[in-house]
Amino acid sequence: MYINKRVLIKLSGEALAAGKGFGMDDEAINEIAKTLKEVHELGVEIGIVVGGGNFWRGRNTEDMDRTVSDNIGMLGTVMNALRVQSALESLGLETRVQTAIQMNEVAEPFIVRKAIRHLEKKRIVIFAAGTGHPYFSTDTTAALRALEIGASAILLGKTGTDAIYDKDPNKYNDAVKYDKLSYREILSNNLQVMDSSAVSLCQSNNMPLVVFGIDDPYNLVRVVKGEKIGTYVGGQ
Ligand code: UDP
């Protein structure tokens, strides 16, 4: 079983906005929080990387310095992290937010040893502000944090789909679903799963990845329990 003691869950901004596409959807966030509680009760240590696409995507802005735009994007992830933290704490879970851009009045700075200590104490750690650097994504952040905290896998919840397909299943009826893939196949077939720097980081460090549909948040529990849903990515 590839999922054991500790996992890194990537929650995209879109998952927090549900069907709205922008902002935060309280109902969706509370559903995700309830599911995270169930995963926590299974005894799994949880690190979360939150995205920010429900507020801002640095690469989508024109007429603006990319570094500034990406800084705005990273700050968006902090808002999401605080919202998820509050949903988890209202369910009685202990959590910490760590930011890659220091803002000590709001959250702890990212310190990997401290993060690991929190995880060992069964606190859920939410990693915000991406890598702290422009030109990266929160997918790359997820790969990096998963490696740093020694996670056994990255669980990547996708909106609008339930797995990896050879082409967009929302556009093509004959799209074929993959149960299992290698990172090499993702790169060589140009499959849009994570950006290529996240994929190569996972590939070169043998970090397993499970891609599943987060529109039904309970899938998170199913994946952790070992049900064969979504797509497993591993190996070379
Ligand atoms: N971002 C960044 N560096 C990072 C992570 C994120 O500059 O290490 C910025 C970037 O502008 C990105 C935005 O934050 O577009 C939101 O993150 P992302 O698009 O990965 O969020 P998601 O699509 O997962 O919601």
Image (cartoon, rainbow, N blue to C red):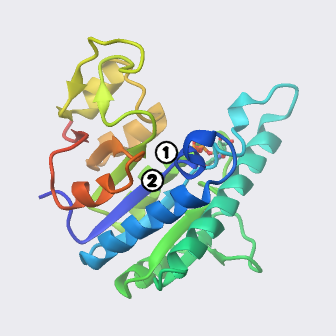
Marks 1 and 2: in contact by CB < 8 Å? yes
Give left or right: position of 102 versus 49: right
The residue at the point 78 percent across, 35 percent down is 66
Point out the image quarter for the N terminus. Answer: bottom left
Q: Mark 1 near ligand 1 (CB under 8 Å)? A: yes
Front-lying residue, 218 or 123: 218
Amino acid under disc 1: Asp
Residue drawn at (70%, 63%) of the image: 101
User: Is residue 116 positioned above or below 10 on the image?
Assistant: below
Q: CA distance from mark 2 to mark 1?
A: 7 Å
Image coordinates for residue 62, horizontal then vertical, percent: 82, 25
Quarter-of-image position of residue 56: top right
Cβ at disc 2 under 8 Å from ligand 1: yes
Q: Circle 2 sits on which residue?
A: 10
| Residue 141 appears in the figure | yes
Residue 161 location in percent, x, y? 38, 33
**Mark 2 or 1, nearer chain start:** 2
Mark 1 lies on residue? 139
The vertical placement of 114 against 20, above or below, is below
- Residue 110 in view in this figure: no
**x%, y% of residue 212?**
32, 43
